[in-house]
Image (cartoon, grey):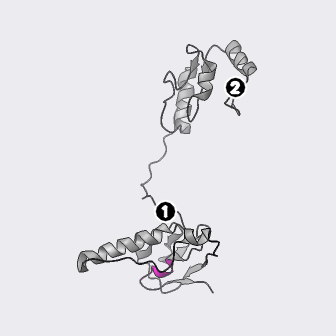
Amino acid sequence: MYQVLQPFPLHTKFIDLLLSEYEDILVIEETTAVIEMQLADRYRVKGKLNRVVPRVGELLPEKIQQYVANFAGVETKINSLPSVPGRRPTLCAGCLHRASFFAIKKAVRYSRDNGPAVVIARHPCIIDSARRGELIKRADVNVNEDCDGCGFCLQNFECPAMVMDQEVEQMCIDPFVCTSCGVCLNICPRGAIIEKI
């Protein structure tokens, strides 16, 4: 096995060495078959161009193990990964689109019962503010004892920094994930998410 650090252009001495020393060569590349094309020996070089390795798709370790075993002509046991329940895609912690989506969802729910609804932003776009060189206010947040563990924030706002503490049946903020954007301060129906003082 050899990891090529500079795939293009391959050094001619390296190409000569590979083709003179080895009968068969397996090339595994994540993207385009750059190394394989430079070796240019379709009978001895195996990889994406002759479909020994798929041309598209992610090359997971389990798949690579199988390709290498097939190439070497040996049996291999692929450990299957345990299946875990899926998780909805979510925006990154601190992503300001989260507040917009939350407001739009709230407006849609309102409009179903009451007719048209309008979303008006209280603050200008944070990206515009940053471009103008304005400082962006940060807010460290905490969850107080008013949290009853209803899960409204988790189900509707879905910030990855919000986690349910099963022991006390309250939501808490993961300080390693929280970006202190402060957008969640207005989410809790009980007002349990507060700014740290």
Q: How many marks?
A: 2
**Left or right of 122 on screen, residue 113:** left
Rendered residue at 38%/76% (across/down):
119
- Magenta region includes residue 126: no
**Left or right of 111 on screen, residue 54:** right
Q: How much space separates mark 1 and mark 2, taking CA atoms? A: 40 Å
**Front one among 20 and 72:** 20
Amino acid carrying label 2: it is Leu
**Front one among 23 and 181:** 181
Using the image, tell me which numbered label, if any, was put on residue 10: 2
Mark 1 or 2, closer to the camera: 2
Mark 2 residue element = loop
**Left or right of 66 on screen, residue 118:** left
- Magenta region includes residue 185: yes
Rendered residue at 52%/30% (across/down):
66
Residue 48 versus residue 104 in the image, above or below: above
**Left or right of 73 on screen, residue 11:** right
Q: Quadrant of the N terminus?
A: top right
Using the image, tell me which numbered label, if any, was put on residue 91: 1
**Front one among 9 and 22:** 9
Q: Is residue 151 visible?
A: no
Q: Which residues are magenta?
A: 184-189
